[in-house]
Image (cartoon, grey):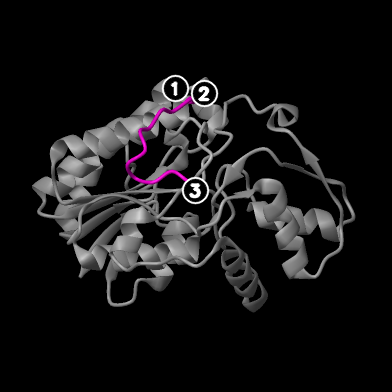
Amino acid sequence: MRALLLGGYGQLGTEIRRRWSGWEIEAPRHADVDIEDAAAVTAAIERVRPDLLINCAAFHNVDRCEEFPDRALAANALAVDAMARAARDGGAAFLTVSTDYVFDGRATQPYDEEAPPHPISAYGVSKFAGELLVDRLQMRAFVVRTCGVYGERASSTKGHTFIDRILAQARAGEPIRVVDDQIVSPTFAGHLAEALLALVRTQAYGLYHAVNPGPVSWYDFAREVLAQAGLEQSIEPISAAEWKAPARRPAFSALENAKLRALGIELPPWREGIAAFLRLRSSG
């Protein structure tokens, strides 16, 4: 099986290239195939002739999306629509990654796939628009929402992973402040890549949630990181309002993998995601 992977050098794309054994994966760099250039995407599909087009690329700087909503829509909605159409016309299935930010955060239990989206940021709006455009095509497509992805590669937006930042501050004896009133499902990219491979094999196309399960605040997640790393350092809990990010974030955006579980696909709990990441770091 052959896949054309766009966004193949980010956190998730790196793990797909590493873990999708049995697949021939072509992962052009952004300089070679810009997702917003429909002609370039079509040409790549015609050249590679993939069985599956995977989109891990996005404009995912949430605060910058608030400043440049037109760019967010271009990358996260219109480009996704064009990619899906090109995949369909080229005889390929399509997989694109969406986000927990399609929800408003008013829930008290993890959102499953039946929960109605209500995004509260330009980023969330753009990603939900991309979902709707793919759904409208009624094609062989997987739309997979995830949350708080972290992996070996640093975030292209922040230049580091959340875990690496916490560890670096602890080792340097610097004060650590982490938001404690946002409840999420942080997800290790390696576990997500493996779940996506299992999902693709089912050919059960549709909308899915895929996270390391178990709702947790970023504050408690950071505390667990330090505990597993054997570091003793206090963390100051702060509110999202104190963090003063330009874009609104959902207060509760943990996800439930209901449809994956129905297929027999399980991701490890969030604590095991931290452990897997730390093992990857220590082996590297």
Q: Is residue 282 magenta?
A: no
Q: Quadrant of the C terminus?
A: bottom right
Q: Residue at x 15, y 51 (%)?
A: 140
Q: Quadrant of the N terminus?
A: bottom left
Q: Main secondary structure of the magenta part?
A: loop
Residue 66's disc number: 2
In the image, 214 versus 76, the foreground residue is 214
Q: Position of residue 270 (x, y in %)?
A: 57, 61
Q: Furthest residue to the right?
A: 173
For the record, the magenta segment spans: 110-121
In the image, 16 versus 115, the foreground residue is 115
Q: CA distance from mark 1 to mark 3?
A: 21 Å
Mark 1 or 3: in front is 3
Q: Which residue is mark 3?
A: 147
Q: Amino acid at mark 2?
A: Glu
In the image, 70 versus 145, the foreground residue is 145
Q: Residue at x 54, y 64 (%)?
A: 269
Estimate how packed mark 1 is, as few (under 14), some (14 to 19) or many (20 or more) residues with alpha carbons within 10 Å. some
Residue 9 can be seen, yes or no: no
Q: Amino acid at mark 3?
A: Cys
Which of the 4 image quarters holds residue 26? Answer: bottom left
Q: Amino acid at mark 1?
A: Pro
* Tags 2 and 1 touching, CB below 8 Å: yes
